[in-house]
Amino acid sequence: MKKVIFVALLASASLMAAESAENTVNGATRYMQKCSICHGAKADETPIKNMKPIAGMDAQKVASILVNYQNDASQDDARISHGYSEEMVNSTVYLSRKDIDAIATYVSSLK
Ligand code: HEC
């Protein structure tokens, strides 16, 4: 019985590893399609002054920023804590939660 549990644990751990590898690959593709035009191919460029490049930013932070922008799209006059950007709203509005996580993982892995 113990052995069965151990094998099950191992299997789920390798599934998780595969999923995060997939996130990185898919995230890279989606990032290039959706974000690189403004944030640079390696997330090392800045679309506006006084902004830090997003490369290496914590994945959870990137994801929550994207979700905030996305939600803003459905509330015309809503404002979010880090500023308002119509470009960011437009570029996040059609992203799935899965894409957001994949892109966020990818951005945090850069640098
Ligand atoms: C058309 C240009 C454009 C595109 C495309 C774009 N962004 Fe942005 N992004 C901006 C601008 C401009 C800002 C800063 C405005 C603001 O503070 O709201 C910004 C801000 C951000 C921030 C917040 C940075 C900070 O320091 O607070 C993150 C994270 C971000 N973008 C990630 C992304 C990701 C990931 C994508 C792809 C899904 C993307 N952006 C697509 C223009 C763009």
Image (spheres, grey):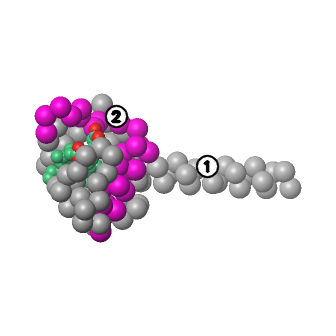
Label drawn at residue 13: 1
Crowding around mark 1 (Cα neighbors within 10 Å: few <14, some 14 to 19, many 20+) is few
Specify whether 4 is left or right of 44: right
Q: Quadrant of residue 98?
A: bottom left
Q: Is residue 45 visible?
A: no
Q: Is residue 65 magenta?
A: yes
Q: According to the image, label 2 marks what residue?
A: 56
- Which of 77/100 is in front? 77
The residue depicted at 20 percent of the width and 52 percent of the height is 85
In the image, what residue occupies the spot 67% across and 49% down? Answer: 10
Region in magenta: 48-74
- Numbered disc 2: secondary structure: loop
Residue 71, given in percent of the width and then of the height, sits at: 34, 62
The N terminus lies in which quarter of the figure? bottom right
Reply above or below: 30 against 51. below
Q: How many numbered marks, from 0 up?
A: 2
Residue 100 placement, left or right of 15: left
Give the residue displayed 29% in from the left and 36% down from the top.
55
- For badge 2, the amino acid type reads Gly
Q: Amino acid at mark 1?
A: Ala
The location of residue 103, given as percent across then percent down, is: 34, 51
Q: Residue at x 23, y 51 (%)?
A: 84
Which image quadrant: the C terminus? top left
Front position in the image: 42 or 77: 77
Seen in the picture, residue 99 relative to 40 is either above or below; the reply is below
Q: Position of residue 17 (x, y in %)?
A: 52, 48
